[in-house]
Image: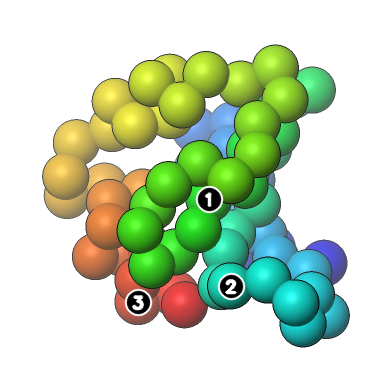
Amino acid sequence: MPTLLRLNGFRFYFYSHEPNEPPHVHIDRGEATIKIWLDSLEVAKSRSFRARDFWHYPADSPTSRDAVGEVA
């Protein structure tokens, strides 16, 4: 599972073979994990992670929609 980015304790990564799912990214911080669909930036799955804790970053951060889309 290649790591795309490490930022402020978050690890952004993907699995190289998930053929039956739309493009997405996995994000972990400590024991918390979240999966985000890249097209809509909707939360697909979350464990011990509140989406609002993640989306509070400013629009010019690497977690913004444009930056995530560039990685996809």
Q: Is residue 5 left or right of residue 33?
A: left
Q: Quadrant of residue 3?
A: bottom right
The residue type indicated by label 1 comes to Ile
Q: In the rendered image, which residue does mark 2 sit on?
A: 22
Distance between the alpha carbons at the discs numbered 1 and 2: 10 Å
Assign a secondary structure to mark 3: helix
Q: CA distance from mark 3 to mark 1?
A: 15 Å
Residue 2 in view, yes or no: no
Identified at 24% across, 65% down, the residue is: 66
Residue 14: x and y in percent read 70, 65
**Mark 1 or mark 2: which comes first in sequence?**
2
Q: Which label lies toward us, 3 or 1?
A: 1
The kind of residue tagged 3 is Glu
Please name the residue shown 75% across and 77% down the image.
Answer: 20
Disc assigned to residue 70: 3
The residue identified by callout 1 is 36
The quarter in which the N terminus is drawn is: bottom right
Category of crowding for the residue at label 1, using alpha-carbon neighbours closer than 10 angstroms: few (below 14), some (14–19), many (at least 20): some
